[in-house]
Image (cartoon, grey):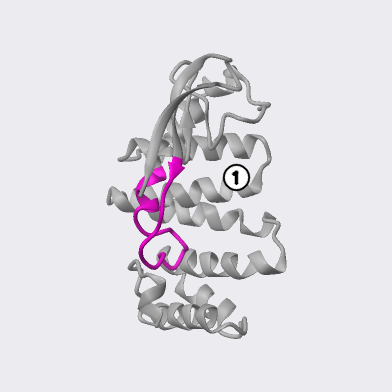
Amino acid sequence: MTIIRDRDQECPLCGKLSPQPMLSSTNTQDYPDLDLRPAEMQRSTMFMWVLECPHCGYVAPTFRRETKITEEFLKSESYMTCDGIKFIGKLSKKFYRAYLIAKEEQNSTGCFYNLLHCAWDCDDKNDPNAVKMRKLALDQFDDLKYDDEEKKNYLLMKADLLRRSGQFDQLIEEFSDILIGEEIYDNVIQFQIEKALEKDTKCYTVGDTK
């Protein structure tokens, strides 16, 4: 069960209060997508994974940390127009602006996840910009920092980003010799390679690999 409540929060940039959705609880009932996008009901909470101040336009996954962003940055053409990208969905714009802020703050992990989430919303809106977002997310990959346990999940995300953005040859070349040693992970990678050979860019879940 998903429970969401609005709570007034202070924008870390302009200092003004606004009601923001807060997640009290949620759950998932099925397999995640191959890029680890969660299944329902958690999937439907994506609209609250990035908050937006209605007063100054600042966006971030949380308002609980300080920011070095200035109001002048929020008024820049790049930020206001999302670098000229015509997104179909409003949530896609929020995630892209959160990416621009993370980029300005030199936060590679923030850049990666905001672009990934932007791609997911583009998928939901049948927005072809999903491919562009996946390619931009891949551009952040070499700057990500993770431990050995986290690396397994990042490899799954990278393989799906490559396949769903049509970079089949790179996926096959890079992942053909990878063996993680855990059945569920190795099944996913082998499945990705098979679909890349078929030049298939469709969305699949971990359950499809069994």
- Quadrant for residue 173, please give it: bottom right
The correct choice, above or below, for 207 with respect to 121 in the image is: below
- Given residues 68 and 173, the one toward you in this image is 68
In the image, what residue occupies the spot 34% across and 74% down? 200
**Does the magenta portion include 31?**
yes
Q: Report x, y in % for residue 170.
A: 53, 73
Say which amino acid is labelled 1.
Gly
Residue of label 1: 110
Q: Main secondary structure of the magenta part?
A: loop
The correct choice, above or below, for 195 with respect to 161 in the image is: below
- Quadrant for residue 175, please give it: bottom right
In the image, what residue occupies the spot 44% across and 68% down? 34
In the image, what residue occupies the spot 58% across and 82% down? 182
In what quadrant of the picture does the C terminus appear? bottom left
Determine whether the residue tagged by mark 1 lies in a helix, strand or loop.
helix
**Does the magenta portion include 158?**
no
The correct choice, above or below, for 182 with respect to 70 in the image is: below
Please give the range of residues in magenta: 24-46
Q: In this view, does 163 lie to the left or right of 156?
A: left
Q: Report x, y in % for residue 112.
A: 57, 51
Q: Residues within 10 Å of mark 1 (few under 14, many from 20)?
A: many
Q: Report x, y in % for residue 169.
A: 49, 76
Q: Is any atom of residue 85 visible in this view? A: no
Q: Is any atom of residue 32 visible in this view? A: yes
Q: Report x, y in % for residue 133.
A: 45, 51
- Quadrant for residue 155, please give it: bottom right
The correct choice, above or below, for 79 with respect to 121 in the image is: above
